[in-house]
Structure formats: C-alpha cells, structure tokens
Image (cartoon, rainbow, N blue to C red):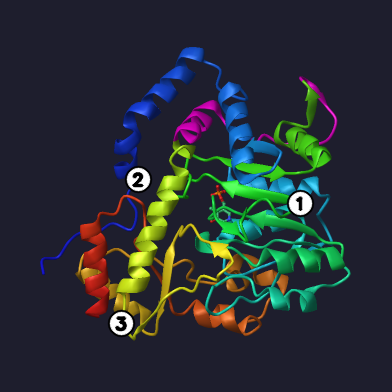
Amino acid sequence: MTVMKIPFMNLKRQYLEIEKEIQEALLRVFERSSFILGPEGKKFEEQFAQYIGVPYGIGVNSGTDALYLALLALGIGQGDEVLTVANTAIPTVSAIIASGAKPVFVDIEKNTYLMDTTQIERKITPQTKAILPVHLYGNCVALDHVLETAKKHCLFVIEDCAQAHGASFKGRKAGSFGDISCFSFYPTKNLGAYGDAGIILTKNPDIARKLLLLRQYGEEKRYFTVINGFNSRLDELQAAVLLVKQQYLENWNKKRKDIAQKYISGINNKKITLPIIKEDVYPVFHLFVIQTSDRAHFQEYMKNKGISTAIHYPLPLHLQKAYSSLGYAKGSLPVTEEVMEHIVSIPLFPELTSFEIDYIITVINEY
Ligand SMILES: *Cc1c(COP(=O)(O)O)cnc(C)c1O
C-alpha cells in the first residue's frame, strides 16, 4: 500500500466547493460598506436561532465571549460556583474565571467522554449558581438529567455548544435546552466563519435585552450607556460567510456522521476503543476520538503512514498551570485523568474522500 498524506483538517477543500457563493456574499458587504451590526448579522442571528429552535440570537465576537457574556447576563460572578468538566477546550473555563466565578469540575463518563450527570448533585454547594455542560466532540450531554437537577436546586443551565452545531438530544437540538446556550464559529467548527465569531441563544427576552447591551458598551441608544458593557460584536463579513455556510451545515453534518459510521463499522482492531454514542443522541462528530493504551506509539505509527492525528485535550483543565492557585488536586477526577492519557483524534471532516477513509481504516486495522 502506498503511503497517502492525510491532513487532520483541510478548510481549503471546503472553500473551493463554495467559492463563488462566498465571494458574492463578501462583495455584497463591500458594496454596502456597512461592516458592524448591519443586515447580514441580523439575518444570521434570526436564521441560526430559528435553526436551533430558540427565539433570540445575539451575535458576538467568539465562543469565549458568548460564554463570558452569558455568565454576566445571569448575574454570575465573584463568590459563585459553576459546575462544568475538565475535559473541554480551555475557553470554557477561561470564561468562567473571567466572570469572577469558580469552575467546579464534575467527572466524565468513560465511554462518552461527557459530563457524568449522575455526579452533578454531590458537587452542588450553596455557592453553586449554574451547570455548564459541554457537548464535546459533537456529542450531547444527557440534558434531561441536567435540567432536572438544575430545577431541583434552582440553578441556571448554560450549554456550551461550540462543538455541537446541529446535534440533538431526544429530537431537540443542543442549545435549545438551557437558559442560555453558546456557540463558537471558529473556522474549524462544524459551522465556521473565516475569522472569529460566536452567538448566544436564549428563550428569555430580558436576558436577550441584557446581552444586546453587554455586547456593545452597555448602550441603550447610541452614546448613552446604562450598564458597563464591552465590545463583542459579530461583524458583517463573518455573518455573510456564516449565512452561506449555514445552508450546508446539515449536509456536512450528515457527511461527518457517515464517515463516523464507516469508522465504527470498519475499525476492528482490539487495541482501539471506539467512541460510544447513546441512543437518545444525534451526534455531529466535530471530532472522532478513540482510545488506545500506547498513544505515543500509535501516533508515531499513524504519522509514518502519512495520517495526522491530534489530542483533544492533552491536559485536563484542573491540572493546568494557569489554575494552580485554585486548589484543584490531582486524583480528584479519576475518569477524566485516566481517559486523557489514552484519547487521540483521527481525521474527520466532510471533505475526506472515500479513498482516504478506506486508507485510514486499513492503516488502523493493521496497527
Ligand atoms: C471552540 C470552543 C470554545 C471557544 O470558542 P472561540 O470561538 O474559540 O472563543 C468554547 N468551548 C468549546 C468546547 C470549544 O470547542
């Protein structure tokens, strides 16, 4: 078998498929020359909120800002605790800390890599204000259990949907369950802009109004500020790109799911543990994460066969240097810590060819 060269991700392939539409959309913005808070952003906010099934959408600068402003809008800050996981992208936790609150970590399930919702309750203290589940890798946390627990203890639910655009749980889209949900449109996400972008969704009109203030200097009308705000806006060029790309999201997600299905039915190497998707979930496979005991050896093997791999993520957040003063201990999240030693992501993006997919499966089975 000749060695192929397979990247972990390739955005250029996707761009070439939609080149003409993207260029027309960008030209439309240049011609209009309104670059901030114009018609593209407004249309995208409406269209995306409708797609997820939530009435209000507030476009912002990034997924990190979406989470940060969501916490502020709910009045969460100094002295409060927010329950989340340590197996997530750094920004989930940076946003909590930026708000002044303390992240408290719930361990994960070994087979789904997601928050173990049966362990939420014993982490709740009088300081707990919110549960922040992360729908990691395009999979969905058991939201019914999260909502039940939140209701019982009067906690807010903020969904981190940065890796789960279009995923659903029991027939409803991720992002339509919580008090607020936050999406990132970082270029490599399932729906990605050509720069930074994000959105906050909510069912609550008062929260929506507050978020509109927070994203632009607290201005109720131009040059009159009523609460201290920030600058976190979704610009018109990014919104125009997102409007084009949103039309393809379902199809791209389906392609991701088909590739995942091929991996799941094709990979039969005993040294590899495949991801588990629960029955209630429609996953969108932002990443395809497997486990293997000697990860470094496996990655080296894949590299020699021309296949790029990555680790999402190599160090759990409770063990990161930046948070060393917050009192987290090694050994406190046994499943997270164990899983993080073995996880490795293999290429999965909609533009992978069937030739490449077959090659990846063969190479892994020969490992
Ligand atoms: C990408 C990501 C974010 C942050 O999004 P940015 O747009 O990069 O700020 C937050 N949470 C998770 C789980 C992510 O994957």
* The residue stretch that appears in magenta: 222-244
Residue 274 location, quadrant? bottom left
Residue 218 visible (yes or no): yes
Q: Secondary structure at mark 2?
A: helix
State the residue in front, 159 or 353: 353
Whether the magenta-drawn stretch holds residue 227 is answered as: yes
**Real-space CA distance between mark 2 and mark 1, rounded to the nearest whole angstrom:** 33 Å
Q: Is mark 1 within 8 Å of ligand 1?
A: no
Give the residue at x 31% y 42%.
12
Mark 3 lies within 8 Å of ligand 1 (Cβ measured):
no
Q: Position of residue 51 (x, y in %)?
A: 59, 41
Circle number at residue 11:
2
- Residue at the image point whose x is 39% and y is 22% from the top: 24
Q: Is residue 79 left or right of residue 37?
A: right
Q: Residue 100 in the image: state x and y as whole percent.
A: 77, 56
Label 3 is placed on what type of residue? Asn
Q: As displayed, is residue 19 above or below residue 353?
A: above
Q: CA distance from mark 3 to mark 2?
A: 30 Å
Q: Quadrant of residue 125?
A: bottom right
Indicate which disc residue 269 carries: 3
Q: Residue at x 89, y 69 (%)?
A: 126
Rounded to the nearest angstrom, the CA distance separating label 3 from label 1 is 42 Å
Front residue of 335 and 95:
335
Q: Quadrant of the N terminus?
A: bottom left
Q: Residue at x 87, y 62 (%)?
A: 154
x, y percent for residue 288: 42, 65
Q: Tag 2: residue type?
A: Leu
**Is residue 305 part of the magenta span, yes or no?**
no
> What residue is pinned by disc 1?
179
Verify CB contact (< 8 Å) between mark 3 and mark 1: no
